[in-house]
Amino acid sequence: KQEVTQIPAALSVPEGENLVLNCSFTDSAIYNLQWFRQDPGKGLTSLLLIQSSQREQTSGRLNASLDKSSGRSTLYIAASQPGDSATYLCAVKRGSASKIIFGSGTRLSIRP
Amino acid sequence: GAVVSQHPSRVICKSGTSVKIECRSLDFQATTMFWYRQFPKQSLMLMATSNEGSKATYEQGVEKDKFLINHASLTLSTLTVTSAHPEDSSFYICSARGQGRDEQYFGPGTRLTVT
């Protein structure tokens, strides 16, 4: 059974810092891995999707990496801003039609 | 493109009553829709998967007679919480996937409070 873990559960850093969020999964046989952002009381916004054959994806100040063999992914946020404050969720799929398995999330707070 | 809406965004109902939540794909045909539940400070838990025109597939531990799901068209799925109890209070999020597509698009969620 696939389990997705995110550490830390919460993180607070001053504005301008670069930071890394971690995600680990127990079953390396994944189809893809996705990072989402969730603001309080809101739905999910997809940030980056990495296919199993890929190593990383970049979008603006965000970079996500994937190491299937070790069951790890990281989300790197450069030059953090207060607007980056949100919960970040990591999720994996076993197959194209499989359900998404979510991690418990990291609550990120960027201090002005 | 790929916008999913939910209605209502917030609902308060009395214990014992039923409440319906709608999930719509606004600019694509959703052959598959998913319903999730999220408790405070916890992650999303899949409740059920529905394919248009078919009965929903429920995850283990989810009562299908309590959480009625209807996916009668390619743009609309509904979740009805029957005989609601305070413990059903939660954040319900739907997502939708188009035919032959991998990616799911998520709705903004519905906050249900049962008093």
Image: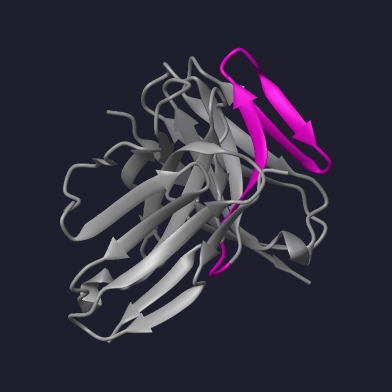
Quadrant of the image occupied by residue A109:
bottom right
**Residue in the image at 33% along x and 51% along y:** B70
Closest to the observer: B85 or A24?
B85
Quadrant of the image occupied by residue B108:
bottom right
**Residue in the image at 81% along x and 43% along y:** A61
- Residue B77, how many percent across, how many down? 42, 51
**B46 shown above or below A26:** below
**A68 shown above or below A90:** above
* Whether residue B56 can be seen here: yes
Q: Is residue B76 magenta?
A: no
- Residue B52, how many percent across, how many down? 40, 38
In this rendering, position of residue B111 left or right of residue B97: left
**Residue in the image at 36% along x and 68% along y:** B20
Name the magenta segment's main secondary structure.
strand
- Residue B69, how many percent across, how many down? 31, 52
Q: What is the image's colouring?
A: one colour
State which quarter of the image contains the N terminus of chain A.
top left
Number of marks drawn: 0
In this rendering, position of residue B68 left or right of residue A13: left
Q: Is residue A63 magenta?
A: yes
- Residue B90, how many percent across, how many down? 35, 69
* Whether residue A103 can be seen here: no
**A72 shown above or below A105:** above
**Residue in the image at 41% along x and 65% along y:** B21
Closest to the observer: B17 or A14?
B17
In this rendering, position of residue A102 left or right of residue B27: left
Closest to the observer: B5 or B93?
B5
State which quarter of the image contains the C terminus of chain A.
bottom right
Q: Which residues are magenta?
A: A40-65
